[in-house]
Image (cartoon, grey):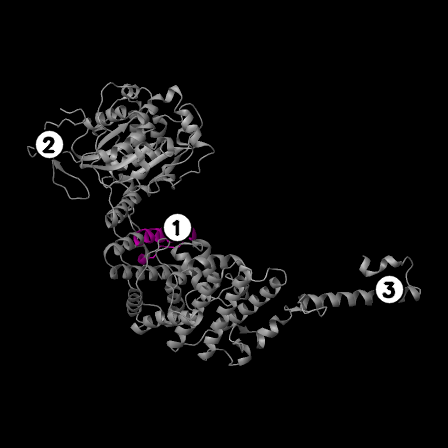
């Protein structure tokens, strides 16, 4: 038999399972092979743990987290410490058996992998990749020269030693079935080297690496980083555990070099045994990951789902339900790979949304409505699907204006970004408003109003990528003030309620983004104008906010609803505040600075919105003096009417007549008033002394010397 060929087992099992999971295999005589996974433990440098102390530590921690331990589990723990010190046999490194997917196959594989990865990640503490520490590469290279690490150096440097170890492990494995791999230290490097060389019918349910040196380039054996750019198609999931006190890990996880891996930090005291396999395997999170691979869910995880009660939804719950309903409608209208990605994103967003609502309700002592409780998603089951939300029937047109205007300007699967075709977006809003009892035309008008607002502000068709920036940029505006006093949609919530909801959900995420968008669309406060004029608020964010406000007014106009006068007031005040900020900064800033250009864009956006509302007859009192107009040259906006007068005091003035603007009029006027006041006060003091006023008065009493 060739030296690099694996010996065939006496009985060659035949795979009869589906393509995704090899649940059942049969031997040549037809007898079924156990569907239970085999546990493969790969040790690091040293003696190879001849007493299998790792096994006792893992068995105890498995029982502590609710699993039955290792009883009945087929465990393989091949020993190769002597081979790592040197071998005489010359053999080739086993060939790769798992091909790297490309193109669409790679995208599909990554999508399926992330779904399985999420099922185990949801059981862990939060992902923690670490930040590393200074000089990790130099330290790792120096460590490999030390006598204690000669075994690691041999595996990395001598192909025949590497080949011997890999072949020895492969000889112990079945040809088909299910496998859970645990690799410690150098064993994690061997596991990464091995996974693409396994028999094609041997599925790796999951892989757990502990104390791994793989983040160091010194351990990039055979270009393994490049080879593992995508998850292997035979790998279910991979979770890595590292310890900040363990120098072997260089204080960081594997996701620093392989971003698709989930990292979790183990916290222990600094000591001699910090790198030991028994230390890692005694950790509850490590045991949970291994136990999930071997046994699936524990009985304690199978809890009765909260069914909730039939109680009215509050504003946050209503907007979440409407958004999830729109997202599900969108998913049904997509196809192929895009639909698969959208459904995966929606599943995670829905699970997170329901969990955050449940936490908020628990904190406030509020009962979970049944309409929300029914939307729970079990992320621990990679095969679970997101339940479809029920239809919303109780929104009036007035309430729907702000809610749907916010929705059309928000990415409902945030933080994921997947482009939705325009025709699909229009169909979704038509179907959604039909379900609400508002009629198909209402849905058409929502999208058409957004498109009209975009043309009015930019002169071009709507850019949906920029449009949904409202959900992100609004957080910055919220931080500058103005939202606490914002008027919430009529009939659903007051200012206090929406402020409370924002405090609970924050401006991020799907619910927080929609709440923030709704508050900004309906805000009627000077604080909003100040926030938009602030130089830290980008012009894109101002455009998104103004566009949403303009969309709401156009939608009201199309649906023959009463206009919201606060929109006009907000735009007037925003334009005024921007002009004031522009006048203040122009005096000192460089001509043509990016900041001034940004202010120019803000002015153009707000003034165009005002002109469009006026053209629609939507200015409150029809006074043309309130409306900015194009100047005679058409090259800019004339500062006329009320806006001109409001900003006039902040414009620069030529004090010395040299033709160069010197200071704003307001500043000049203040200085002149101060000088006049000092002069008048001095004259008064001098007169009092002449008339025999209080003694002690001297020239130092002059107000300009105090």
Residue 245 vs residue 338, the one in the foreground: 338
Of the numbered discs in the image, which one, if any, rests on residue 359?
Answer: 1
Which numbered tag is attached to residue 12?
Answer: 2
Q: Are marks 1 and 2 in contact (CB under 8 Å)?
A: no
Residue depicted at x 53% and y 63%: 597
Dot 2, crowdedness within 10 Å: few (<14), some or many (≥20)? some
Residue 384 position, x and y percent, is 25, 49
Please state the horizontal and vertical placement of residue 628, each as a whole percent of the image. 53, 75
Judged by depth in the image, the label closer to the viewer, 1 or 3, is 3
Q: In screen coordinates, is 415 left or right of 181?
A: right
Marks 3 and 2 sit apart, C-alpha to C-alpha, by 114 Å
Residue 310 in magenta stretch:
no
- Magenta-drawn stretch contains 358: yes
Identify which residue, 250 or 377, lies in the foreground: 250
Determine which residue is flagged by label 3.
685
The residues tagged by marks 1 and 2 sit, at their Cα atoms, a distance apart of 53 Å
Q: Which residues are magenta?
A: 346-371
Residue 615 visible at all: yes
**Distance in Å between CA atoms under marks 1 and 3:** 69 Å
Q: Could you tell me how many numbered marks the image carries?
A: 3
Whether residue 246 is visible:
no
Q: Provide residue 181's location: percent of width, then percent of height.
A: 26, 32
- Sequence order check, earlier mark of 1 and 3: 1
């Amino acid at each position: 038999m060739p030296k690099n060929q694996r010996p065939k087992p006496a009985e060659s099992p035949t795979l009869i399972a589906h393509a995704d999971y090899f649940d059942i295999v049969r031997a040549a005589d037809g007898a079924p092979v156990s569907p239970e996974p085999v546990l493969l433990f790969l040790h690091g440098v040293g003696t190879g743990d001849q007493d299998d102390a790792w096994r006792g530590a893992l068995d105890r921690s498995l029982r502590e987290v609710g699993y039955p331990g290792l009883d009945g589990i087929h465990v393989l723990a091949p020993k190769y410490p002597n081979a790592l010190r040197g071998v005489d046999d010359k053999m080739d490194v086993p060939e790769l058996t798992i091909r790297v997917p490309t193109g669409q196959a790679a995208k599909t594989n990554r999508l399926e992998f992330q779904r399985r990865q999420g099922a185990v990640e949801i059981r862990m503490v939060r992902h923690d990749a670490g930040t590393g520490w200074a000089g990790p590469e130099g330290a790792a290279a120096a460590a490999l020269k030390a006598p204690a690490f000669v075994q690691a150096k041999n595996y990395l440097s001598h192909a025949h030693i590497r080949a011997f170890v890999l072949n020895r492990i492969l000889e112990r494995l079945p040809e088909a079935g299910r496998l859970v791999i645990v690799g410690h230290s150098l064993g994690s490097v061997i596991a990464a080297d091995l996974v693409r060389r396994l028999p094609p019918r041997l599925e790796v349910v999951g892989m757990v690496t502990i104390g791994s040196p793989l983040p160091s380039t010194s351990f990039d054996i055979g270009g393994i980083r490049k080879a593992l750019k995508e998850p292997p198609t035979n790998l279910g999931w991979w979770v890595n555990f590292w310890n900040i006190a363990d120098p072997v890990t260089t204080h960081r996880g594997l996701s620093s070099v392989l971003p698709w891996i989930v990292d979790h930090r183990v916290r222990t005291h600094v000591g001699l045994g910090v790198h030991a396999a028994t230390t890692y395997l005694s950790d509850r999170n490590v045991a949970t990951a291994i136990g999930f691979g071997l046994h699936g869910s524990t009985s304690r995880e199978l809890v009765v789902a909260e069914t909730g009660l039939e109680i009215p939804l509050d504003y946050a719950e209503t907007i979440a339900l409407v958004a999830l309903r729109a997202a599900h409608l969108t998913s049904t209208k997509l196809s192929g790979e895009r639909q698969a990605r959208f459904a995966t994103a929606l599943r995670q967003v829905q699970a997170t949304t329901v969990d955050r609502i449940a936490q908020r309700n628990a904190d406030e002592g509020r009962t979970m409505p049944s309409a929300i409780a029914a939307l729970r998603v079990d992320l621990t089951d990679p095969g679970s699907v997101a339940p479809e939300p029920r239809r919303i029937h109780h929104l009036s047109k007035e309430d729907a204006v702000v809610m749907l205007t916010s929705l059309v300007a928000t990415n409902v699967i945030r933080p994921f970004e997947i482009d939705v075709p325009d025709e699909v977006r229009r169909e979704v809003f038509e179907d959604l408003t039909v379900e609400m009892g508002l009629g198909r035309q209402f849905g058409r008008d929502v999208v058409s109003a957004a498109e009209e607002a975009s043309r009015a502000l930019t002169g071009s068709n709507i850019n949906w990528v920029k449009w949904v920036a409202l959900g992100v940029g609004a957080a910055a505006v919220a931080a500058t003030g103005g939202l606490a006093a914002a008027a919430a949609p009529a009939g659903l919530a007051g200012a206090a309620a929406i402020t409370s909801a924002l405090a609970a959900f924050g401006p991020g995420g799907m619910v927080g983004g929609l709440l923030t968008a709704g508050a900004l669309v309906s805000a009627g406060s000077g604080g909003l104008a100040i926030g938009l004029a602030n130089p830290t608020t980008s012009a894109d964010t101002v455009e998104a906010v103004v566009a949403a406000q303009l969309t709401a007014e156009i939608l009201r106009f199309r649906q023959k609803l009463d206009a919201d006068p606060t929109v006009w007031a907000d735009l007037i005040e925003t334009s005024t505040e921007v002009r004031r900020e522009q006048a203040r900064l122009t005096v000192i800033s460089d001509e043509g600075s990016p900041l001034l250009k940004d202010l120019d864009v803000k002015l153009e956006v707000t003034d165009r919105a005002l002109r469009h509302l006026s053209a629609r007859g939507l200015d409150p009192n029809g006074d043309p003096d309130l409306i900015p107009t194009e100047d005679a040259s058409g090259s800019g906006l004339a500062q006329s009417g009320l806006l001109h007068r409001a900003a006039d005091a902040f414009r620069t003035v030529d004090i010395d007549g040299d033709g160069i603007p010197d200071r704003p009029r307001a500043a000049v006027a203040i200085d002149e008033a101060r000088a006049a006041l000092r002069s008048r006060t001095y004259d008064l003091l001098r007169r009092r002394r002449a008339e025999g006023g209080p003694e002690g008065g001297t020239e130092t009493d002059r107000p300009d010397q105090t």
